[in-house]
Image (tube, rainbow, N blue to C red):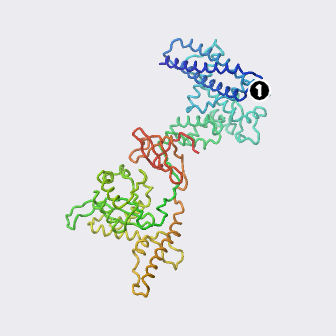
Amino acid sequence: MSAKALKALKAKRTAIKAQCTRARNAIDTIDPQAVDIAYVKQRKEKFTTYWCQFNELQLQIVELLELSNDLENVDQLKIEEETECANFEEGYFCTAGKIDALLASSCNLATASVSDIQKTHRPNVFERFSSLSKLIRITALCLRFVNNARNRGVRAVGRITTQELLNSNLRLVKIVQQTAFKQDLHVLKTQGTVSRQSRLLCLSPFIDNLGIIRVGGRLQRATISCDAKHPILLPANHPFTCLVIRHEHQRQLHAGAQATLAAIRIRYWPLSARNSVKRCIRECIICRKADPRACEAIMSELPAYRVTPSKPFERSGVDYCGPFHIRSGQLRNAKIVKAYVAAFVCLSTKAVHIELVSDLSTEAFLNALKRFMARRGKVRHIYSDNGTNFQGASNTLKELYYMLLSKDHQDKLNYLLKEDLIEWHFISLHAPHFGGIWEAAVKSTKLHLKRVVGDSVLTFEEMYTVLTQVEAVLNSRPITPLSSDPNDLSYLTPGHFLVGDSLTAVPQQDVMYSPTSRLSRWQRVSQIFQHFWRRWSREYLQQLQQRTKWQQSKGLHPVIGDMVMLQENDSLPLHWTIGRIENVFPGTDGIPRVVSVRTAKGTYKRPITKICVLPLRKED
């Protein structure tokens, strides 16, 4: 296997060398007296890309030769690779010098040195590694390769030693400090201390005999190790610092910020350490999978049917609750059966209509729907939960789920809807908060039933009577706060839109025989209802203006391509299904509300409150 891999890597390297040769020939044909700067810069870009690709392949070949056990003549192959690398480097630097000379002559600039070219085009190595151990090990291999090329008489072979790993780590620390603390390093070398404006002044830094900046501090007399007394200084928000934090976090078995920071400071002193450690822990995939955080978007705008005046129950929401146990008759030994409650809610006035349903058959539900429309008038739009919301619930709710999704139920319901010109709307899967208004009505209904009925088992007629009384109480609740004026005892209730007054109000004096014309009386009734709607628009709508919760979005906004976990109520977070977002469905405000997630078992549609985005990309 190693021989095949080595052959494939050499084939790729040969192709890159051929491209470099063509680029070199194109540079050689350029006339220094007529230089096209754009053309030369383009060639320079391509040539630098080839150089980076060659280096990547060369590193892979060196690592393969060091770690393989089934290759013959490994030492001879290493010598050949060293010669190959030296020849390529010589050709690259020669051509790079020519390119730089062409650009300098055309712009009357001094010729840049080869080292400057290397620094300009050096890729950010630290961001290409996800593991500190791997970065140190590969750097050690590269340093061994360079030493073997320079000192062919004394060559290092075999496995990487501990000393080589230590030297590799110190070399990386030097590079990081030279990049991040360039000014402070220069002042320390010349004056022995940092300037008063430096952010390192409180740490009393110094340079040790290896050229590394360490913390001076105040612990010289402490009985701890030298590395703990004078830890190595690291910059904040640097990729190498993140690798160090991630490495110690994993070594401490994914401990919290305090334990991870204590382990890091035994050897290193990162600036803004606590914030950096917390950020890296937030980005840890394993920690996020063990303690997932669901997405949370700002509360959306109210839909049009909630803020538009309409006839009561013209736009309604419906939900089931139960089961409740009732007696099938008045006899003492009457059979106890299950019954359910269907709660219909007017989406504009919050009026409630409650129907008792004898069982979970399609006929019983359709009869309840017919009774509702016969008493409250025709309905144009009905909104409800999706049937699959009940799939993961208890066995009792599974019965309701199977009834709602059965073909016979859907056929009969569709026939009734077509006959009465009713449009049925389903909210998104697993998003009961999308129908919060009817969920609140069900909650209030259960509250009264628990306090009034308790553990008693009523007959069908008794239960229906109690539910009707509960309905009257719910329709008599104020939907706007009472006035602060002690003389104002009026308040607006859903009952005002149904019968012109609260359903629990005391009957008023009979004014049937007052001397008023019929037209004037009809106009007066119309005026009263217009007054109710005017108060509804002025008082109730303004009450809906504020967001009582979900006042801002939290966490990562889901985008197409994100890896996410699907929340499952019947399993632990570590066993939740992982998938990738295929599509995002924003609301009317443009904020994502529902996503489509592709998993190994299929594609599912979920609200963003039921997914947890894995931190594979940075937060905004």
**Is disc 1 surrounded by few (<14), some (14 to 19) or many (20+) residues within 10 Å?**
some
Please give left or right for residue 102 compared with residue 612 in the image.
right
Residue drawn where x is 20% and y is 64% of the image: 334
The image position of residue 588, as x and y in percent, is: 51, 54
Residue drawn where x is 39% and y is 70% of the image: 473
**Residue in the foreground of this view, choosing between 220 and 47:** 47
The image position of residue 249, as x and y in percent, is: 54, 37
Does residue 128 lie above or below 558 as drawn? above
The image position of residue 44, as x and y in percent, is: 68, 26
Does residue 437 lie above or below 492 as drawn? above
The image position of residue 238, as x and y in percent, is: 63, 37
Please give left or right for residue 360 compared with residue 501 in the image.
left
Which corner quadrant of the image does residue 193 belong to?
A: top right
Q: Is residue 163 visible?
A: no
> What secondary structure is found at the residue carrying circle 1?
helix
**Residue in the foreground of this view, choosing between 243 and 498:** 498
* Residue assigned mark 1: 104
